[in-house]
Amino acid sequence: MPTPRPMPTTDDVTTPAAAREEQAVGHRPQAPHGPQAPHRPQAPHRPQAPEGGRTGELSSRIARRAAEAHAGQPLDRLLAEGLPGNELTTLLLHCLRQRALRRSFAEVLDHAERTPMTHASAADARRIHAFDAAAYAAAAGFEAVDLAPVGPLGATACAGVEPNNVLATVRFAEVAADPTTGLALHAARRRRETRGGEPLRFCASQRVLRMQPTKHPGFSPHFRLFALVTAARSPGRSEDDACERRALLEHLLVWADLIRALPAAGFRAAGLRVVLSDTAVVRACLGARGLDADALAQRAKAHEPGSSEAALREASVDLPRAAADYVGAARSLGLGPEPVARAERWVAEVGEPLARARPEVEIVYDLARLQGLGYYAGPFVQLVVRRDDGLELPVGDGGAVPWLGALLSNRRERMVATGIGTEMVVKLFDQSAPRAEARSTPRAGEARPEEPTP
């Protein structure tokens, strides 16, 4: 039995008002009638632009009604708050359609040349495929997901990301800026479908787009990431942290296996250092020195290499950044019993098991990590890969985030997400790349695509 079509509402922002009226009367839209744009000789084969038509008439009606109902209201507020979503979509679609149909090929090319986000990646697509193949093999215990290129408008804002750093669309969506956001939504839908509490493990490779301005030459607005996500239901509040640490240990074992497999795939990876941190411990360390952790974290920007170190230096913070003895470092700083206990659990449940399972991995603890401090909640990590010539580069990070619990209104739903910058590994670790390129200084946006805040 076919599912009945839901009645349209003004909150259904994905369907323009013009389409709603056509659906309501039960007919397909006819070809629009009205004056056409003048013929443009530089693009003789492109369609001519109708000025009116049903969409144009409806847009004019919406505009008149809005002007009467919201007289004197500033235009930006009217568009942001005054109009129902479907009417706003109709207006924007109509306006952009008219602009699009008036553009020539020459104008399109000129726009493309001055807009880096439209440029193809400089990485070899076959080498990206080789990296992905190795990553999917290492993550054999995770279900592989091919994510959509867009998500619902506001998804990254809910995750604490500045909306201006994400490319929004006219149809109330946004271009993917991080695969973990899409995987979180996927995990939430799967949890609702199954109603079970078994752990869900997903992995995905996705090209993402981030819109931060940068002063660094060679910045690539879009790049590929490979991500792991585990969704696990904690049996109780006392087990929340342990649940996250178990998931994180699983992720670290996968990344260790991937780095170990990369040389056979033609990449110059020679070792892995895992930098472990905990947001509660870092905040305790900074607070003990009378510093505002959130204010410092805001100065550490992923697309500005060195900003974290500069913020700590300007604040005269001298805390262990690569301690081998986490518990000893926490005690020596005079932290309270809870931060020390968290450090002890970190070592017992993550550090020591990882060292036993993958003894080739170097493990250190960072008590002053700023990047991701306002993004993660609990355990978070950084992955530093050593090249065969000794160069070490941060290629990945991750940690626990509260998104799944918020999506499902259940704090027992825990989520851990980690990722590696595929593009960076391909550009700077590929054996087949020219040596000059392989020795080049990592570029902002390419060297640190693993950082969480787009």
Image: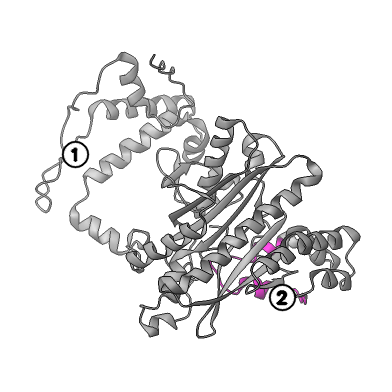
- Residue 266: image quadrant is bottom left
Q: Which residues are magenta?
A: 295-318
Q: CA distance from mark 1 to mark 2?
A: 62 Å
**Residue 380: x, y in percent?**
67, 60
Residue 66 pos. (x, y %): 44, 27
Residue 448's place in the image compared with 102, above or below, is below
Q: Sequence order check: which comes first, mark 1 or mark 2?
A: 1
**Quarter-of-image position of residue 383:** bottom right
Query: Is residue 164 in the magenta section?
Result: no
**Which residue is label 2 attached to?**
322
On the image, the x and y values in percent for residue 153 come to: 49, 41
- Numbered label tally: 2
Amino acid marked by disc 1? Ala
Location of residue 252 (image quadrant): bottom right
For label 1, the crowd category at 10 Å Cα-Cα, with few meaning under 14, some 14 to 19 and many 20 or more, is some
412 left or right of 71 in image: right
